[in-house]
Amino acid sequence: MKPKLATGLAALALGFACARALPPPAGPEPVPPVPPAPSEAGEPAAPGPCLRIERIVVHKGERRLWARCKGGAVVMLPVALGRAPEGPKRAVGDQRTPEGEYRVAGPPRASRFHRFLPIDYPSIVDADRALAEGRLGRDDHARIVAAHRSGRLPPPNTSLGGALGFHGEGVRWRGESTTLDWTDGCIALADADLDFLIARVGEGTPVSLLGAGAPVPLFAAP
């Protein structure tokens, strides 16, 4: 069993306008609905409330992210990929987004792209394949495997690269992620969409990154 990753999650910050309090209505106070994903322009982002995301699927060909929520609701969000979007990531600096099965690998942190949420790339599968193909040395392969088995982030300083995950746009790329692949291999979302995800995922949440030729998911099975 994969060790549990370090816990921790930054809270989603929401702004509310101030108003003078009114007398409470009779009966139980209604519970406000969960806000939809911001990119949906006011339309409901899911057929029901999304309080917790259980799985994330990104389809590189569609430039879309599907988040399956506890209870069955699904949220779909646009994403941007690495500047070289075709094919899986094979080496540091190739500007490709990985393809494979990963997990949210740590709490979010501040970034010049608003916020950053890491995944555990490279996986053991990535490391095994690279070792067999001569793209990774045995010592670095052992470091990657040891990190996974101890619940740590894989080292980013091997021939496979690392330090990848989800991030926002920040000021420089605001509004670009619906039309342009601009990252060095990460998955970028509008800042508000990233905040929506961060508030609802936990460390260890499964993340499937599908290649352009993969079937478009109705939603991927667990």
Image (cartoon, rainbow, N blue to C red):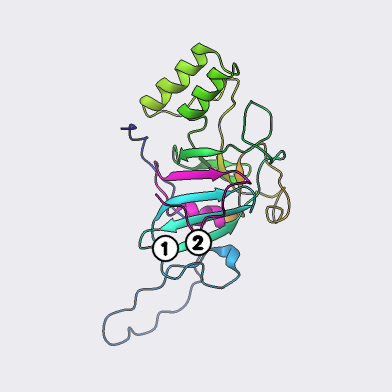
Can see residue 98? yes
Q: Is label 2 in contact with label 1 (beta carbons under 8 Å)?
A: yes
Looking at the picture, tell me which residue is in the foreground, 43 or 131: 131
Looking at the picture, tell me which residue is in the foreground, 184 or 191: 184
Q: Residue at x 50, y 61 (%)?
A: 75
Rendering coords of residue 217 (x, y %)? 52, 55
In the rendered structure, which amino acid carries the disc numbered 2? Val
In this view, the mark in front (2 or 1): 2
- In the image, residue 23 sits, relative to residue 14, either above or below, namely below
Q: Residue at x 48, y 43 (%)?
A: 108
Residue that numbered label 2 is attached to: 75
Can see residue 155? no
Residue 198 left/right relative to 160: left
In the rendered structure, which amino acid carries the disc numbered 1? Cys
Q: Which region shows up in magenta? A: 193-222
Element type where label 2 sits in the image: strand
Q: Quadrant of residue 110?
A: top right
Rendering coords of residue 94 (x, y %)? 69, 30
Element type where label 1 sits in the image: loop
Rendering coords of residue 179 (x, y %)? 73, 55
Q: Residue at x 39, y 57 (%)?
A: 52
Residue that numbered label 1 is attached to: 50
- Tell me how many marks there are: 2
